Image (spheres, grey):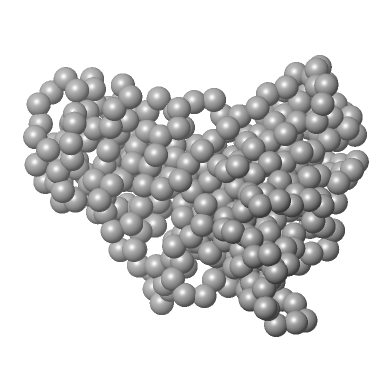
Amino acid sequence: MQTVFFSTLLWGVLVLWKGSEQIGDFQVRLVDGKDSCSGRVEVFHEKKWGTVCDDGWDMNDARVVCREVDCGSAKSAPGNAHFGPGKGKVWMGHVQCSGHEDSLKDCSNPSFGLFSCPHSKDAGVVCSGGTEGEGECKGKSEEQCQLDSLDNLLNNSSSLTPAMLLNVTLRAVDLLSQWKGEVGEKQIDVALKIPEKLALALVKPTQTQSSSHLSTKKIEVETFAIGPEANLAEKPQLKARDNLLEIDLLTIAKNNNGSGAVVFIAYANMENVLKAEFFHTERETNKTMMSSVISASLPNTKNTTLPEPVNFTLRHLTQVDPEGQLTCVYWNQSRWIVDGCELTETNATHTVCTCNHLSTFALIMQTT
């Protein structure tokens, strides 16, 4: 079963936001709160982060911020540097939102930076997507509540922008990597479904060929797309966190009216969630994750049949035991299995896995 994890990103500036990224010339983030859905409001302008003055700050302004950072509804709009004073410029003040705007920059406010306001008056918000939310979150863990909130956000809205979808995806990744307790099949299924929707929203057609790259602390993504007028002499090789993917995209495109796109993603620390112990074998062995969890997909492609197997070159995370057995595996709902993948080459630092399908993959070592 093919799992679509991510897709090409729109051209723009990517800026770190509490473990999430946003795209564009103007961004909003929440910092120094209890979670990513509460904190001091900061905006990005002229390549610098700054704060918002609490003069006139109210719930209508908070509603716009919570919507912009994909954190549900506004619960409160504290001022007086409730989450601590920020640094740098106080970019905005006297913000007057109706509560229906898509972005804080669309509200009625004076020009950026053309007023005086001390950081002791920095504005903040608390959104329902955070730990202080109640109602639907009652009786759930903090992580489960936030993950359900992300899932509901996508299920109930068809108007999310690519930037918003990107934030949702990275927040889901962040939640899984910091999950407390046992991660169940339901949580993993939701976390895989969220990037699938992102991929469908972000893939754009091209007449020739294009590629894009995204690198954050949580994920690294490489994309490659070709169109009917592409001049591609050899198979593209995509790279993410020192892992490589080689795929015959040209033939795939020919089988899809001349267009095709491939996405390759490597996760940081996801091997601690989709653990080696989820690889069940007849013989009891000690299992070690030897690579990052990686994923490959063909977004918006009707005919996903591979003309030939693909090669994944996976970088080892630790030293190989000479007596150990390396196995190429892929994720199937709740466990790692080997169907359709085989180890074709290995050395001290990398292993090549050859697979006849695309999904989520890793390298596991067994020792006795």
Q: Position of residue 187 (x, y in %)?
A: 56, 66
Q: Is residue 72 placed above or below 364 in the rendered structure?
A: above
Q: Is residue 194 placed above or below 307 in the rendered structure?
A: below
Q: Residue 158: which quarter of the image?
A: top right
Q: Residue at x 32, y 30 (%)?
A: 44
> Residue 359 versus residue 242: which sits nearer the camera?
242
Q: Is residue 78 placed above or below 229 in the rendered structure?
A: below
> Residue 246 versus residue 257: which sits nearer the camera?
246
> Residue 277 versus residue 297: which sits nearer the camera?
277
Task: Tell me if I can see residue 311 in this picture.
Answer: yes
Along the horizontal axis of the image, is 291 left or right of 21? right
Along the horizontal axis of the image, is 203 left or right of 177? right
Q: Residue at x 72, y 29 (%)?
A: 225
Q: Is residue 321 placed above or below 252 in the rendered structure?
A: below
Q: Residue at x 58, y 72 (%)?
A: 184
Q: Residue at x 16, y 48 (%)?
A: 84
**Mark count:** 0
Q: Position of residue 198 (x, y in %)?
A: 60, 44
Q: Position of residue 339 (x, y in %)?
A: 83, 63
Task: Tell me if I can see residue 165 in this picture.
Answer: no
Looking at the figure, which quarter contains the C terminus?
Answer: bottom right
Q: Residue 33: which quarter of the image?
A: bottom left
Along the horizontal axis of the image, is 260 left or right of 58? right
